[in-house]
Amino acid sequence: MADSEGKLSAAREAMDTIVEISTLLNTGLDADTLAICVRLCESGANPEALAKVIQDLQRESTALKEADSTVS
């Protein structure tokens, strides 16, 4: 039981560190999104391809918001 608690504590600490780094780098990703990204990478997703997809989605989201604000 203590071993699983130690692993859980280490996982939380690692996730806290990832969130802190993300905040410092101003990625715009929340903790839930980062957790999904970590799980995808642990499952074999290519981190560089994942980063590219996220950047493309953020760029498209920004473009749609700008287009929507000019129409309104």
Image (tube, rainbow, N blue to C red):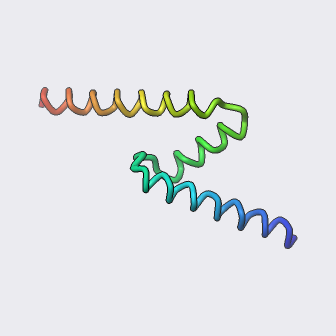
Write the residue at 70% across / 60% down.
11
For residue 22, above or below residue 53: below
Closest to the observer, 33 or 72? 33
Write the residue at 43% across / 32% down.
55
Is 62 positioned to the left or the right of 29 in the image?
A: left
Write the residue at 20% across / 26% down.
67
Is 38 positioned to the left or the right of 26 in the image?
A: right
Quarter containing the C terminus = top left
Closest to the observer, 23 or 1? 23
For residue 21, above or below residue 37: below
Residue that lies at the very extreme toward the bottom in this rendered image: 2
Q: Please state the horizontal and vertical placement of residue 34, each as a whole percent of the image.
A: 55, 47
Q: Please state the horizontal and vertical placement of residue 36, each as a whole percent of the image.
A: 59, 43
Residue 46's quadrant in the figure? top right
Quarter containing the N terminus = bottom right
Number of callouts = 0
